[in-house]
Image (cartoon, helix red, strand yellow):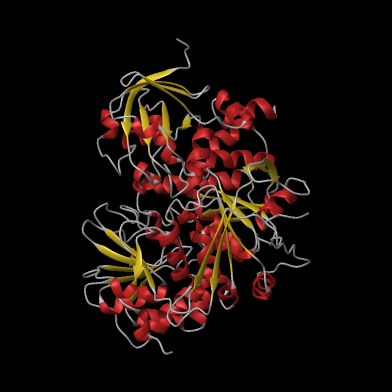
């Protein structure tokens, strides 16, 4: 299997998950490496202790709405989550995730994914395989310059390549 | 050029094109950029250093220390100190330390002009729309890109038109209009889209009150918000020191909109967003809040001079209820000074208010006075989800400053109209 393919379990959440639920304001002054311990704390206080490396968050509509705090995707990334899949994202969360190198996939059909389903995800091609349900989903394609950023691993490595 | 909304015209100008189409990706030159302590050097300083490039244009860059300021824990002191050292190291020309809330300073200090593209590391950067500028939020990592290149990529968004007809009735303000529309469109109603506010109701409103509408476009998940410029906008801009010709852009008659909403506001009652969502809105007479422990006049959307004056009109000659604290955090030092000069502040203090720092305070869940478990608050701020102002087990009602003031007197969510002369 291609080494960019992420394999893990699905953790499902509802619609309009606000960045304040993803990363409560109390942790705004915490350094990055401590944010992971508090990911999703506003909706599931045990999430950080349950999640395993490369698991997936599966959201509903407008995932990451509210404040544009980058600690939200950073916390998810540092909790070990490999990618976030949602029916739709709020734009601030979506942009921030791409900038910090957290793969985000828009999958309008992802509601059929159940908590605990075993998934494998290709963040570049956008293919989402559900091994538990034996189904395959395709995430919406993204514009080329966003893909360039994703392939580089985020905005900073991308700028390091293009500005120097 | 035709078929273009104001938002499209701004994006065409900053990308050097005659016109742009919805869905197109453009690279735009940024006219003003904002960064604050919470989404600033503490998160992006190392990445900025890694690139080793200077700030593209220091005259167009505003840095504020408003979210963690003044600090209530050591980790916040650290964030502030990192912010201050970075400002010094980079020779930032416009750094404001505990002077006011970023969006208000951006306007008051003359960084925003009609036709501008404004980026900021805060969702409420949409506030700039009241001055005819397109304010767009980004994160601290992307801020590194803007600071080093002066450019940002944007997908040309669709525009939603929200039009208000009629005269703003007795006891209502911009906040009530905002909540009215939020009830309809919902918290995801404008994701990736620009809201264009328009209609005769706006003409009678002050520029500050119009900012409540563009600021709270963020609560619809909007990418940005915009309004046409009129005489009042121009007077505001001249007052903050902007000279020379202004770039006045209007939407073309045949501009294309995603959707249009129209509200006749002649019979509007004061509106209240009930816990725990900004679109959980009803008229004040339908609210049965039970006892409140906190009333809060604060934030970039609810503590401008006009908000404080509205609260003072209600509170004059009254005392706040026993068992309730009224926290008042003017949105900038300039607003505080004006409120001192015209007597507004005395009225608020005599009624029993507590004066707080001119920063974000409890609105961003960081300052002193946060809510404890089981506490109930009414606030003139912009968000009320669980945990926004402290404990996840607290409840927040959102309303205009006048409704907050009336509720502070009664000790429960109350109608301001009975305290105001017609």
* Residue B207 image position (x, y, % from top left): 58, 71
Instruction: Judge whether B386 appears above or below B377 on screen.
Output: above
Residue at point 65% right, 54% down?
B256
Residue A33 can be seen, yes or no: no
Instruction: Judge whether A67 appears above or below A58 on screen.
Output: below
Residue at point 34% right, 88% down?
B317
Q: In the figure, residue B416 lies in which quadrant?
A: bottom left
Q: In the figure, residue B115 lies in which quadrant?
A: bottom right
- Say which of B19 and B146 sits in front: B19
Residue B115 can be seen, yes or no: yes
- Specify the quadrant that holds the N terminus of chain B: bottom right
Instruction: Judge whether B416 appears above or below B94 on screen.
Output: below
Q: How many marks?
A: 0
* Residue B8 image position (x, y, % from top left): 68, 52
- Say which of B95 and B126 sits in front: B126
Relative to B127, is A70 on the left or the right?
left
* Residue A31 image position (x, y, % from top left): 41, 37
Residue at point 56% right, 44% down?
B86
What residue occupies the far top of the structure in this picture?
A: A1
* Residue B202 image position (x, y, % from top left): 57, 73
Instruction: Judge whether B353 appears above or below A41 on screen.
Output: below
- Specify the quadrant that holds the C terminus of chain B: bottom left
Residue at point 32% right, 63% down?
B274
Q: In the figure, residue B67 lies in which quadrant?
A: bottom left
């Amino acid at each position: 299997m291609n080494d960019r393919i992420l394999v893990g379990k699905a953790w499902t959440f509802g619609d309009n998950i606000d960045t304040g639920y993803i990363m409560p304001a109390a942790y705004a002054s915490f350094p990055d490496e401590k944010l992971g311990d508090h990911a999703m704390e506003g909706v599931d206080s045990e999430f950080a202790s349950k999640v395993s490396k490369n698991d997936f968050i599966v959201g509903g509509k407008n995932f990451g709405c509210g404040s544009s705090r980058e600690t939200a995707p950073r916390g998810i990334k540092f909790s070990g989550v490999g990618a976030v899949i949602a029916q739709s994202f709020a734009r601030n969360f979506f942009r921030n995730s791409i900038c910090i190198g957290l793969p985000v996939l828009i999958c309008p059909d992802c509601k059929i994914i159940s908590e605990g389903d075993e998934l494998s995800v290709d963040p570049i091609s956008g293919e989402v395989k559900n091994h538990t349900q034996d189904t395959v989903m395709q995430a919406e394609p993204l514009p080329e310059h966003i893909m360039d950023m994703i392939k580089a691993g985020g905005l900073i490595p991308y700028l390091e390549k293009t500005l120097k | 050029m035709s078929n273009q909304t104001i938002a499209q015209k701004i994006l065409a100008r900053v990308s050097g094109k005659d016109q742009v189409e919805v869905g197109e990706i453009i690279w735009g030159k940024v006219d003003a950029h904002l960064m604050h302590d919470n989404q600033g050097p503490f998160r992006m300083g190392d990445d900025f250093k890694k690139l080793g490039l200077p700030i593209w244009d220091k005259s167009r860059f505003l840095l504020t220390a408003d979210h963690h300021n003044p600090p209530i824990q050591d980790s916040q002191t650290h964030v502030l100190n990192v912010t201050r050292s970075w400002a010094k190291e980079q020779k930032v020309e416009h750094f404001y330390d505990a002077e006011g809330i970023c969006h208000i300073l951006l306007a008051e200090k003359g960084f925003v002009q009609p036709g501008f593209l404004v980026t900021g590391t805060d969702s409420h950067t949409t506030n700039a729309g009241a001055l005819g500028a397109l304010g767009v939020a980004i994160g601290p990592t992307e801020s590194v890109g803007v600071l080093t290149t002066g450019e940002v990529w944007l997908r040309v968004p669709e525009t939603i038109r929200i039009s208000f007809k009629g005269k703003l009735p007795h006891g209502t303000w911009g906040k009530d209009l905002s909540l009215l529309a939020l009830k309809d469109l919902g918290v995801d109603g404008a994701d990736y889209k620009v809201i264009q506010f328009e209609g005769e109701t706006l003409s009678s409103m002050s520029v500050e009150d119009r900012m409540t509408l563009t600021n709270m476009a963020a609560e619809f998940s909007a990418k940005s918000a915009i309004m046409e410029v009129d005489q009042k906008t121009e007077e505001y801009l001249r007052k903050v020191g902007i000279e020379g010709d202004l770039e006045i852009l209007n939407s073309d008659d045949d501009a294309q909109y995603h959707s249009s909403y129209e509200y006749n506001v002649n019979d509007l009652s004061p509106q209240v967003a009930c816990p725990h969502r900004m679109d959980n809105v009803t008229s004040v007479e339908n609210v049965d809040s039970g006892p409140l422990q906190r009333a809060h006049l604060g934030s970039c959307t609810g503590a401008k001079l006009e908000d404080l004056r509205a609260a003072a009109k209600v509170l004059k000659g009254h005392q706040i209820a026993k068992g309730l604290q009224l926290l008042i955090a003017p949105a900038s030092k300039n607003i505080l000074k004006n409120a001192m000069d015209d007597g507004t502040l005395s009225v608020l203090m005599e009624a029993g208010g507590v004066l707080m720092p001119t920063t974000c305070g409890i609105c961003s869940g960081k300052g002193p006075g946060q809510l404890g478990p089981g506490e109930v608050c009414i606030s003139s701020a912009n968000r009320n989800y669980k945990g926004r102002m402290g404990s996840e087990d607290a409840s927040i009602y959102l309303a205009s400053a006048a409704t907050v003031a009336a509720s502070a007197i009664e000790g429960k969510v109350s109608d301001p109209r009975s305290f105001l002369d017609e």
